[in-house]
Structures are given as structure tokens and as C-alpha cells.
């Protein structure tokens, strides 16, 4: 089995992760403590791409409204999140913006906080500070993903998390009537 076959077989975990991130950010249930001593806030930042597994049918929703009624409706129509715009705030001061892809779980268009180092005075310092910011965002997201995996394989997933997530998806139907 080659790498692409393995990715296709495990892609569903990435889709589940993106859905769980959106669910947790909207229900304010919070994201489990992502890393030692850090306070992180993660939110879906207004753009989602959802697709079905059977046919090439996708919808991209962009909206400043965090409820994203169309995306919630797409979830009820068995579409799954394949890409999500994420805003990550660490320690209430550093904001990162990026898109996560469910297939490879990679970052796209990662925007870090402003680098303080002056590139003219210290080009190496600028590089190292920027690299450090990128590593910080990746480390936090790795930690959040590991927390998700722990929940996903635990009895808590079937007993608590999945029923709450399904209830949240179904509550999207009432949003469409408003």
C-alpha cells in the first residue's frame, strides 16, 4: 500500500478533527489545555470547505458570522469539513491565522504575529524569531490534536462528546429558520 492509499484511509480523522475544533469553539466547551503553561484560544475564522465522500460535490462558506448557517446545513446534508480557516490566539497576545487541510493536516497561508526583530540590523534574528513563532503555532496545534486523539479513542467520545456534537449539528436546523 502506498502513502496515498494510507492517507485516503485515514483522512476521516482529519475531517473529524476540523469538525470537533469548530464544535468546541462554538459551544465554548473550550479546547483542552494545549501545552504546558500556555493559554490558547482556537476559533474557526469564517471560512470552511465541506465536501461529500461519494461524489465531487463541495461547498465553501465564508462568513463573518460564526454560526455559518450554510455550513451547518451542509453538515446535515452529510458533507464533511475538508478545509478550515483557523485563528489561534496564544496567551491572549499572539494571534496566528492559517488554513488547515484535513487530508494532510498541513498549515496553509500561516500568518504569524509581527516579528519584532529588524531585518536590516539582524537578518538572522528576524529569521529565528519568525521560525520560533511558526514552531510555537505548530506545537500548540500538535498538542490540541493529541488531546483530540485521546478523546476520540476514549469511552468519553461515544458517551459524551459524540452525542453533544450530533446535538450541535442538529441544532443548526433551527438556525436556518431564523
Image (cartoon, rainbow, N blue to C red):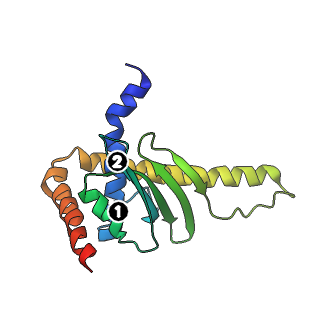
Disc nearest the viewer among 1 and 2: 1
* Residue 79 can be seen in this image: yes
Image quadrant holding the N terminus, namely top left
Please, which residue is most extreme toward the left here?
159
Seen at 73% across and 64% down, the residue is: 116
Q: What secondary structure is marked by label 1?
A: helix
Q: Secondary structure at mark 2?
A: helix
| Image location of residue 89, percent across then percent down | 50, 66
In the depicted structure, whether residue 80 falls above or below residue 3: below
- Quickly name the residue at label 1: 71
Query: How many neighbours does mark 2 have within 10 angstroms: few (below 14), some (14-19), or many (20 or more)?
Result: many
Q: Tell me what residue is drawn at x 51 percent, y 72 percent.
A: 92
Residue 51 x %, y %: 36, 49
Q: Position of residue 59 (x, y in %)?
A: 40, 55
**Mark 1 to mark 2 CA distance (whole Å):** 14 Å
Looking at the image, residue 55 sits to the left or right of residue 93; the answer is left
Q: Is residue 148 left or right of residue 112?
A: left
Q: Quadrant of residue 111?
A: bottom right
Of 109 and 48, nearer the camera is 48
Residue at the outermost top position? 1
Residue 96 lies, in percent from the top left, at 56, 61
First in sequence, mark 1 or 2: give its number.
2
Write the residue at 41% across / 74% down: 65
Label 1–label 2 contact, CB within 8 A? no
Q: Which mark is residue 15?
A: 2
- Taking the image as drawn, is residue 41 in sight? no
Query: In this figure, what is the number of numbered marks?
Result: 2
| Residue drawn where x is 25% and y is 68% of the image | 172
Q: Quadrant of the C terminus?
A: bottom left
Pick the residue in front: 125 or 21: 21
Amino acid at each position: 500500500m502506498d502513502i496515498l492509499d494510507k492517507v485516503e484511509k485515514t483522512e476521516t480523522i482529519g475531517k473529524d478533527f476540523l469538525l470537533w475544533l469548530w464544535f468546541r469553539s462554538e459551544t465554548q466547551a473550550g479546547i483542552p489545555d494545549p501545552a504546558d503553561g500556555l493559554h490558547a484560544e482556537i476559533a474557526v475564522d469564517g471560512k470552511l470547505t465541506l465536501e461529500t465522500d461519494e461524489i465531487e460535490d463541495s461547498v465553501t462558506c465564508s462568513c463573518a458570522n460564526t454560526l455559518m448557517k450554510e455550513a451547518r446545513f451542509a453538515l446535515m446534508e452529510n458533507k464533511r469539513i475538508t478545509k478550515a480557516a483557523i485563528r489561534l490566539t496564544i496567551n491572549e497576545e499572539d494571534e496566528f491565522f492559517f488554513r488547515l487541510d484535513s487530508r494532510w493536516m498541513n498549515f496553509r497561508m500561516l500568518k504569524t504575529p509581527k516579528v519584532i526583530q529588524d531585518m536590516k540590523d539582524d537578518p538572522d534574528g528576524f529569521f529565528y524569531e519568525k521560525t520560533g513563532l511558526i514552531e510555537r503555532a505548530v506545537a500548540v496545534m500538535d498538542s490540541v490534536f493529541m488531546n483530540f486523539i485521546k478523546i476520540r479513542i476514549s469511552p468519553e467520545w461515544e458517551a459524551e462528546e459524540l452525542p453533544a456534537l450530533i446535538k450541535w449539528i442538529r441544532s443548526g436546523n433551527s438556525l436556518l429558520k431564523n
